[in-house]
Image (spheres, rainbow, N blue to C red):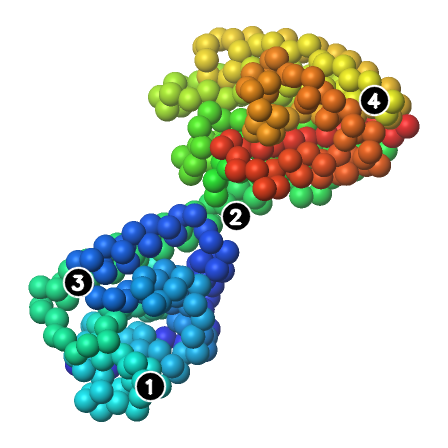
Amino acid sequence: MTLLHEPPADTRAAALDELVLSTLTGTPHLGMLDRIVDLAARVFDVPMVAVNIIRGDVQVTASGWGELHTGDLTPRQDTFCERTILTPDPLVVTDAVTDPRFADHPAVTGDDPIRFYAGQPLAAPSGERIGALCLVGRQPRTISTAQLELLRVLADWVERELAMQDELDWAAEVQTLLLPDVAPVAGDLQVAGVCLPARAVGGDFFDWFVLPDGRVQLVIADVMGKGLGTGIVAASVRAALRGALCFDEPAEALTRAAASLQEDLNRLGVFVTAFVARIDPRDWSVEYVDAGHGLALVLGADGAVRRLDTGGLPIGVSQGELWVSRRTILAPGETLVSARDGFLDPFGDSALDPFRVGSQILAFAARANRAAATAQDLVDAWAGLGTGFDAEDDMTFIAARRPA
C-alpha cells in the first residue's frame, strides 16, 4: 500500500468547517448518519462503529454507535483515523496488539485495548480526505474482500450525506443573504422583519427597498411547501416581484410578476401567497395588495387593532388574475404588521386559518406592540414565539412603524 501526502490541515478544515459545526449543533439531516452506523454495526457484527471527521488537531465523531458517541472530541494523535486519511485505500488492523504500527498506541496499551479496526477514508466534495467510516472491536478478527467492498459502499453513502448537508448549508446561507439585513432609510419610518424557516431552507421570505421617490416597498410571501425545492421557487418569486415593483404600482406589479411566473408555477403545481405594501413617509399613506395572504394588521400605541381588508387569489392559482390596490393611513404611533401562518401555529387551533384570526392572536399582537419601543422590539417579541416551539411551518413576520 502506497501512502500519499496528507492534504494540508487548513485545506481539509476549510472543506468541512461548516459540516463539523453543524454536526456539533445537531443538524437534523445528519440523523441519516446514525442509520448508517447502526446498519454497519449489525451487518459487520462489531461493537463499535463511527463516522469520524479529522479537523485540525481534533477528531470529531459525527455519528457513533456502541462505546463511540456522537459529538465525542478526541485528540488527533490518539486516533486510528489519523492514519486512515493518508491513503484512499481502507486501513485494516486485524490485531493491533501485534501490529507494529499500533502496538504502542494509547488505545491499545490500556486495560481494555482495541484489537480490531477497519476504516474506509471519507472525502469531501472537493476530494480532500477528511475522516473515516470505521469499524472497531475488542477482539482480533479478519475482514474479507467482499466485506471491505461493502464498507466502501457504506462510506460512499456517508459521503453523499455529507455533501448533501454541505449543499443545504450553502442554500440556507444564500437564502439568508437574500433577505434584507439593513432597515430602509426613509424619514422616521421604522421597518424590521424576521424569517425562521422550519427546515434548513424554506419557502417564506420578506423584502423591502426604497423607491426613487422615497416611498418604501414591503413584501412578505410564502411559497406552498417546504425544503430546498421550495426555496428555489421562492428565490424566483422574489426576483420577479422585486423587478416589477421597482417600476410599477403595487397592483400592476403583482399582475405582471404573476403573469411571468404562471407557467412555471403551474408546471410545478405550487402557488404563492403574498402581501405587498407601499408606504409614503411624506403623508403616511399605505397602498397595499393582498394575494391570498390574509393577515395584515394595523396596531395602535393605545392597544387598538384594526385588520386591513384583504382578498384576492394567491399567485399561480388563476391565469389572468387582476389584483386590486387598497389604501390606508398610518396614524402617529401606529404599526403595520403582517405575519405568515407559521407564526399562528403556537396559538393552537384558533389560528389554523389566517382569515379567521382568533382573539388570542389579536390580544398578543396588541400587547406586544404596546410593550415595543421600536419596530425591531415588536419583531423580536414575535420571534420569541418560535423559541422552544417545534414549528412545522416557516415563521415570517414584518413590521413598519410610524413614530408617535
Give the quarter of the figure containing the N terminus: bottom left
Distance in Å between CA atoms under marks 4 and 3: 66 Å
Distance in Å between CA atoms under marks 1 and 3: 25 Å
State the mark number for residue 303: 4
Q: Is residue 99 visible?
A: yes
Residue shown at 46% from the left, 25% from the top: 224
Q: Which residue is mark 1?
A: 110
Give 254 or 221, whichever is nearer the viewer: 221
Tell which tag, 4 or 3, sits nearer the viewer. 3
State the mark number for residue 173: 2
Q: Are marks 1 and 2 in contact (CB under 8 Å)?
A: no
Q: Amino acid at mark 1?
A: Gly
Tell which tag, 1 or 3, sits nearer the viewer. 1
Q: Earlier in the sequence, mark 1 or mark 2?
A: 1
The residue tagged with tag 2: helix, strand or loop? Answer: helix
Give 88 or 102, whichever is nearer the viewer: 102
Q: Position of residue 403 (x, y in %)?
A: 87, 30
Q: Would you say 135 lies left or right of 263 here? A: left
Displayed quadrant of residue 158: bottom left
Q: Residues within 10 Å of mark 4 (few under 14, many from 20)?
A: some
115 w.r.t. 307: above or below: below
Distance in Å between CA atoms under marks 3 and 2: 38 Å
Q: Would you say 112 lies left or right of 396 here? A: left
Residue shown at 43% from the left, 75% from the top: 74
